Amino acid sequence: MPTLQANPQETTYTSRLGLKAVAIAVLAACAALPQAWAQGGDGYPNKPIKLIVPFAAGGSTDIVARIVAEGLRSTLGQAIVVDNKAGAGGVIGTEAVAQAAPDGYTVGMATVSTMTINPFLFTRAEGLPAKLTPVANLVTIPAVYMVHPSLGVKTFDAFVAKARAEPGKISGAVPGLGTLGHLLLASFNDTLKTEIQIVPYRGAGPALNDALAGQVQLMPDQLPSAMPHIKSGKLIPFVQASDGRSPDLPNVPTFKELGYEGLNQLGISWFGIVVPKNTPAPIVKRLQEAAVKATHLPEVQQRLKTVGANASDMDQGQFPAQIARESQRNKALLEKIGVKPE
């Protein structure tokens, strides 16, 4: 039987094909490494992270976000780029987070409004929380109720007495229909049996301007943005929603100590972070651990205290349940005051 011998040219060609196949496989494997690291959390983060704030610069959410970002730079070892995407009561920025790639490099600030009110206030926000993964509840901020000095009252009892004696004559500013401020005043009326006129504005800025000018006599606001006006004497605080009296307002009682637990819980705002749905669990865990650690850094805690905020000590595993619980509460409140989605 004749012996078959390999053609040298065919052997060389086959070898080249084999080497080429190996090279392609190696390149493909290398290209897949970053994705594999991302899926497993190893090597994350290896580039700057964008932190989307769904409100304008200068407000409470923005103030908290920039403080948290400083802490995250330390605990994650990467630059945190704060990106304000305001509009539609926080919906535009929240949508931007939901639509981002689920790779851990786009993170969003989440608030009571964006996660538990907007889905029942704006048609376009319906179902939006389901497109996000809650990471951590990081910071809580008290609400403080303030009056213009011209009203002539300085205490809770004096305010309630005047409001009951003059039904419909005291007006209160809120940032818009269905906003947290609206829920606060509507619930105040319902609980204390008062008839404060609720005046909705297009945003917190215009509402605060008219409160400072005395065009409206009352406004509930979050402590960070309220404190400068309280310190200047332009607005007088008479009650706060907080687990304990703020060190900045030691003489102002809380709803809790006055026996109005529902008003107290409604008025405590929280600020957390969320990521797009389907972000790998190891990345979510890495972010959660880094964020909690960031808010407990001494320098971060000090900065939070200067604006009247506190680092949250909640069990982060309970954050999704908290969102679900408060969503049901706020949906019921919106229905009670007759605010429908637009």
Image (spheres, rainbow, N blue to C red):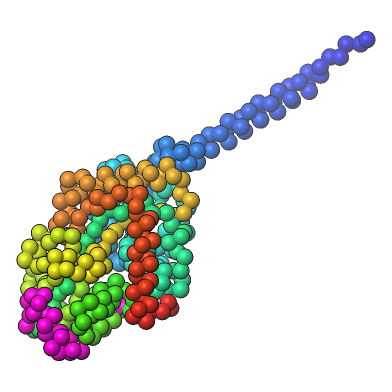
Q: Nearer the viewer, residue 83 or 334?
A: 334
Q: Residue at x 63, y 28 (%)?
A: 22
Q: Residue at x 32, y 43 (%)?
A: 289
Q: Nearer the viewer, residue 129 or 72?
A: 129
- Residue at the front extreme, as displayed: 259
Position of residue 168 in the picture relative to residue 27 (left or right): left
Q: Nearer the viewer, residue 54 or 258?
A: 258
* Residue 240 horizontal/vertical position (percent): 16, 68
- Residue at the right extreme, as displayed: 1
Count of numbered labels shown in the rendering:
0
Q: Which residues are magenta?
A: 152-176
98 in the magenta segment: no
> Which quarter of the rendered picture does the C terminus lie within?
bottom left
Among the 4 quarters of the image, the one containing residue 276:
bottom left
Task: Note whether residue 225 is visible.
Answer: no
Give the vertical position of 321 relative to 175 (above or below). Answer: above
Task: Note whether residue 132 is visible.
Answer: yes
* Residue 175 horizontal/vertical position (percent): 28, 76
Q: Residue at x 56, y 34 (%)?
A: 29
* Residue 304 horizontal/vertical position (percent): 18, 55
162 in the magenta segment: yes
> Which quarter of the rendered picture does the N terminus lie within?
top right
Among the 4 quarters of the image, the one containing residue 246:
bottom left
Q: Nearer the viewer, residue 243 or 77?
A: 243
Position of residue 100 in the picture relative to residue 26 (left or right): left
Give the vertical position of 76 relative to 110 (above or below). Answer: above
Give the vertical position of 95 relative to 294 (above or below). Answer: below
Q: Residue at x 25, y 74 (%)?
A: 184
